[in-house]
Image (cartoon, rainbow, N blue to C red):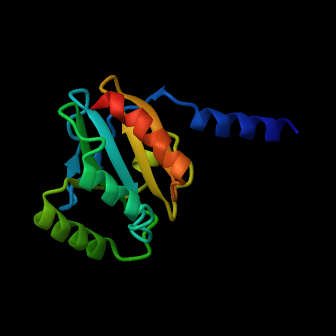
Amino acid sequence: MVAAAFMFNIAANAQSLPRPVRNVEVQNLDGQKARLPMWGQKNLLIFYVDPEVPKQNHDFITYLEETGRVQGPNIYGFGIVNLKDAVYPNSVVRSIADARTKKNGATILCDPDHWISSAWRLGDCNNCFVIMLVNKKGELVYMHKGEMSEAEQKKFIAAAEPLR
C-alpha cells in the first residue's frame, strides 16, 4: 500500500504544471550534440513526436499553421523526434526529418534515448505526439500526450496565446 501511494505521488508530481525544466542536450539530424534553440530567449512550442504517430494531431497542427493562431514574436516552435521509441531505423527517421526541414525550413532535433522525457518527467511517450509549451523562465506550462480533444485544443490555445 505504501508503494502504491509512493507511485501515485510520483505520477501526480510528474504531471503538475507549471514546473521548472532544464535545457536538455539532444542531437541535431546529423547526430551531433545540440541544445534546445532559443532557450530563455523565447517561449517554446515543442512537438515531441514518436515517428510511428506523426499525424496524430495532424488536423489541429494544420489549423495552427494555417491560422497562425499561436504564432508571434515571442514564441518559437520546433520538433523533437523521439528516436528511442521508433520502430524504424534511426537513420531512416533522420533522413525523413532532414527532407522535411529542407522542404519547409522547420527545426527538427532528435532525442535518441528519452533524454527529454526523463529529464522533464513526462512519463511514457511511446506512440504519442506530445505538445508542450515552455516559457522563457524555463517552466513547462503546458503538456499533452496523444490525440487532442476539442476541449484540450482550446486549453492549449488558452495557454499559448499569452506567450505569443
Residue 88: give x, y in percent of width and height: 38, 77
Using the image, determine if residue 58 lies above or below residue 131.
below
Quadrant assignment for the C terminus: top left
The residue at 52%/62% (across/down) is: 126
The reply to whether residue 36 is visible in this rendering is no
| Left or right: 127, with 8 as reference point | left
Please state which of residues 72 and 107 is positioned toward the viewer in this rendering. 72
Q: Nearer the viewer, residue 157 or 110?
A: 157
Residue projecting furthest to the top: 137
Task: Please give left or right for residue 73 compared with residue 24 in the image.
Answer: left
Residue 17 vertical position relative to residue 34 in the rendered view, above or below: above
Please tell me which residue lies in front, 9 or 144.
Answer: 144
Where residue 158 sits: x, y (%)?
43, 35
Q: Nearer the viewer, residue 145 or 50?
A: 145
Q: Is residue 10 left or right of residue 95?
A: right
Q: Residue at x 52, y 57 (%)?
A: 146
Give the quadrant of residue 159.
top left
Residue 70: image quadrant is top left
From the viewer's perspective, is residue 93 above or below residue 37? below
Q: Position of residue 6 (x, y in %)?
A: 75, 35
